[in-house]
């Protein structure tokens, strides 16, 4: 994850990434490699209180398993189209 801090992804006892909280990490962008790692695994992704200016179109690769996406208090000026398409 691009930003000032690095962080480990929390893996549950079942080996799945049901919830990933990357809030308050000063993240400016989420690389495709991270999205691919989370694909079809994560149900809740928290990216609040970071430095995101937008979301990559690659976020659609997270699939239908993603039910919750928190991007509050970032540098977004419009709601990301890829996020709205994921929850239709």
Image (tube, rainbow, N blue to C red):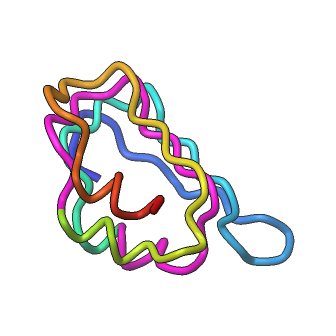
Q: Which one is in front, 30 or 13?
A: 30
Q: Quadrant of residue 21?
A: top right
How far across and down, in percent of the image, does residue 70 sit?
Answer: 48, 37
Q: Is residue 64 left or right of residue 6?
A: right
Of residues 35 and 78, which is closer to you in this image? 78
Q: Position of residue 37 (x, y in %)?
A: 44, 76
* Residue 46: image location, x then y, percent: 51, 41
Prevailing secondary structure of the magenta residues: loop
Residue 13: in magenta span: no
The relative height of residue 83 versus residue 23 in the rendered view (above or below) is below
Range drawn in magenta: 35-56
Task: Give the left or right position of residue 80, taking residue 11 as reference.
Answer: left
Where's residue 50, x and y in %?
A: 32, 28
Up/down of 4 relative to 74, above or below? below
Query: Residue most toward the front?
Result: 88
Residue 82 is left or right of residue 47, and the answer is left
Question: Taking 67 as reference, is 79 above or below it?
Answer: above
Q: Residue at x 46, y 47 (%)?
A: 7
Q: Quadrant of the C terminus?
A: bottom left
- Give the residue at x 65% y 67%: 17
Question: Which image quadrant is residue 57 in?
Answer: bottom left
Identify which residue is drawn at 47% across, 59% down.
Answer: 87
């Amino acid at each position: 994850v691009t930003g000032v801090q690095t962080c480990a992804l929390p893996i549950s006892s079942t080996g799945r990434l049901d919830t990933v909280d990357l809030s308050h990490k000063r993240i400016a962008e989420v690389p495709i490699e991270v999205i691919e790692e989370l694909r079809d695994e994560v149900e809740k992704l928290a990216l609040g209180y970071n430095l995101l200016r937008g979301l990559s179109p690659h976020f659609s690769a997270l699939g239908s398993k993603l039910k919750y996406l928190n991007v509050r208090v970032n540098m977004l000026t419009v709601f990301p189209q890829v996020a709205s398409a994921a929850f239709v």
